[in-house]
Image: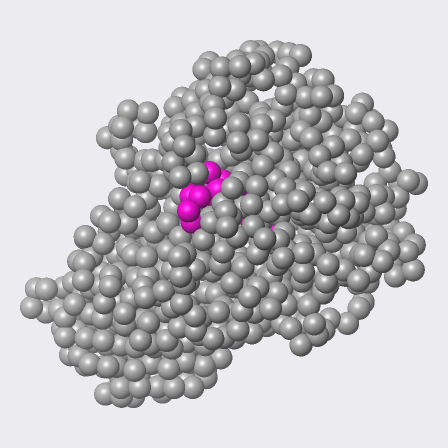
Amino acid sequence: MVRARRIRGLIGLAVSALCAGLLSAPPPAAADADDDSGGRLTDLVNPFIGTRNEGNTFPGAAVPFGMVQLSPDTGHTTGYDWEDKSIRGFSSVHLSGVGCGLGGDLPVMPTTGDITSTDNEKYAASFSHEKESASPGSYKVTFDDYGGTSAELTAGKRTGHQRYTFPATDKANVLLNTGQALHKVTKSTVRVLDDRTVETAITGRGFCQDTREYTVHTRTRFDRPIEAHGTWSGDKVTDGSGSSTGGGKRGAYVRFDTRDGDRDVEATTSLSYVDAKGAARNLASEGGRSFDATREAARAAWEKRLGQVRAEGGSEERRRVFYSSLYRALLHPNVGEDVDGRYTGWDDKVHRSKGFTYYQNWSLWDTYRTQAQLLALLAPQESRDMALSLLKVDQQGGWLPKWGYGTVETNIMTGDPVTPFLTNAYRQGLLKGHEEETYRALKKNADGVPPADSPYVGRMGNEQYLKDGFVPFLPDGEREKPGDSDFEHGASATLEYALSDAALAEMARGLGHGDDAARYAKRAQHYRDVFDKSTGFFRARDGEGKFTGPADPAKSKGFHEGTSWQYMWLVPQDLPGMMSLIGGREATGKRLDSFFAYDKLLKDPEKTAREVWVNGPYDYYNADKYNPQNEPDLIAPYTYLSTGQPWKTTDVTHAALTLFTDGPDGVTGNDDLGTMSSWMVLTAMGVFPVFPGTDTWGLSTPAFEKVTLSLDRRWYPRGHFTVDAKGTSDKDRYIQSVSLGGRDLPRTWVTTDELRRGDLSFETGPKPSEWGTGEDAAPPSTPSRVG
């Protein structure tokens, strides 16, 4: 979850603000029948979930993994905030759940009358939620201003489609603002090409800090002739002007006469990260459909994707939350190539994809923990292409990324998230024919540091890590490159490096690189080098190797967006070893009970989740409790699988699921390109990736009686996978037994290959059982598999 240092301050979750009945968004139109009986699954999706309390989702129109996300901007840093009362425009690029301003390119706004301002904050139109609706691939709002002008949005893969309905007026305007966005626009150009077409190029930078610049090209074509137009530079509007170029506020207006009864104006905007010709080709490819036909195609695309997962049982609200989460999990990464396969690489040169689709937008520190694994199940072809796209980043830009946006690296977040992301693709069988190529890129990344003239930071603490076994905590060190510093978060960077080394060790072993496998497995034990025996917790070390910062683990320093309490459980590669450091299984269980406030949780799960656990999207520090709103703790509930208390995993995860509701604040923390939503989907299914970067799935009680996945037969020959938990409920939630493919499964985990071969069936009851309590039932660790 990206830090909030340049966005709003801490926002607490008031208890009253969490009552779904009081604060739920207007739901989409109800389906004729629910998903159990064949109704439209898109009718269960509420795109407004996550638009309040810094979930930072967007309610606008997109198709799965599409280049365009056409959505309203209300003045919030990342686009839309439920509490705002006006809309500044509908821009073409958004990322769901990011924590700093990014995208928002080309806000387009319908207005009436004279052009009196070129600032979108001033010409913004007021609106109310009662006059607003959204569903997958569609958005509509009617303004209180401009004579009740309404705007409807839908999208194709590379195009955004708008339909504006004006009052009867001879000054129905569409403003195309090239100089304002959610990030910093450094230069823009707008040109009126003919009586129907406007072309722009927008160059900008920024995402929590200044990054390298990137350029997005657009072409907008209207369905009727433009009757008048002009451009602006700064505050000066020049009627009749056909172009404007430079920095600062820039844009153009086009005008229509709607007095003859035809009050609709349709516009289609295409994007290209390559050039104007690319935008023109993308428009030609998708711009021929009517607005209604485009909207129906978008709905059908979402219906097909959502239809891959059929959840049965549970409440109507639970299904709404589930499918809304699944929807958000399928928004990113995004197609980065034009219809002809051209894309701009990270070397700023134009390339053409061959045999794969090129994707971009990589929130890797977040998505490697949940979303990557969910997409490997539901979208293996796209997941393969996403992995190959990252290899192109390495080939063309010189190094693998940490947090990539568009055509540039932002260097946001810390550790080495790209390694478990790519080793996950390998372990899921998605990289056939590219295994050694991937391994070479990962080995270079794991064993080195990008050169000084590279914009990447990579494992910037690697020299010290390889020499001393830890990344030193150097909070006052000079930052040579933009972005986050591993040295400012030395303790957590060490843990993240070690986890990545463990995942890479497994890949090396699978490819027959035995010496490398042993070397990386040994490095995976470096988590021990930041363990302070005097406190019994992980702790940062300074440049001389001395433990530093407060001894109190709740006030520890050197952990990125968390404390030592929360990072204690980020050792999936060797939980037995970690537990031995703090006194064994029993001592670990007691510490987990304290961490989750387990006694209170049993008495009142929802109250504990909302009032005792960490609450607040940017409340990262000074805490000794579980933080369900941020990534470092996503695996933590599954640690109970290794203490012989698997029923406690179910207790904790089911309490955490109550934080996901059918209201605008129904996401825990920033959604981070579908990371938190993927956690919800996987946890509700009862199958969760407990060791990122491998194919190990931990088990807990599903939240539904049955979930059936329709899978791509190229990777999953059976074509389906079913999780059955007949009779499960809040009362009968404890696993009594599990079978896989009809055979008894006494352990608490499965592999992807096993999921390919058989279905899972859970028998549940009102009390914990002996299932999964033996030491040999716990998920395996790297030392047991590599050595």
| Colour mapping used in the image | one colour
Percent of width and height locating residue 116: 32, 79
Q: Quadrant of residue 394?
A: bottom right
Percent of width and height locating residue 181: 44, 70
784 is higher (above) or lower (below) than 285: above
Residue at image coords 73%, 49%: 516
Residue at image coords 77%, 51%: 494
User: In the visual, does 291 lie left or right of 769?
Assistant: left
Is residue 414 visible in this depiction of the protein? no
User: In the visual, does 168 lie left or right of 360?
Assistant: left
Residue at the outermost left position: 260
555 is higher (above) or lower (below) than 187: above
Q: Is residue 277 magenta?
A: no
Magenta span: 365-382
Residue at image coords 42%, 43%: 379
Is residue 750 visible in this depiction of the protein? yes
Q: Is residue 371 magenta?
A: yes
**Magenta stretch prevailing secondary structure:** helix
Q: Nearer the viewer, residue 735 or 378?
A: 378
Q: Quadrant of residue 657?
A: top right
Percent of width and height locating residue 669: 56, 46
236 is higher (above) or lower (below) than 290: below
Q: How many marks?
A: 0
Q: Quadrant of residue 126?
A: bottom left
Q: Nearer the viewer, residue 530 or 235?
A: 530
User: In the visual, does 593 lie left or right of 56?
Assistant: right
Residue at image coords 90%, 52%: 547
Q: Nearer the viewer, residue 16 or 680?
A: 680
Tell me the quarter of the image containing the C terminus.
top right
Percent of width and height locating residue 504: 67, 47
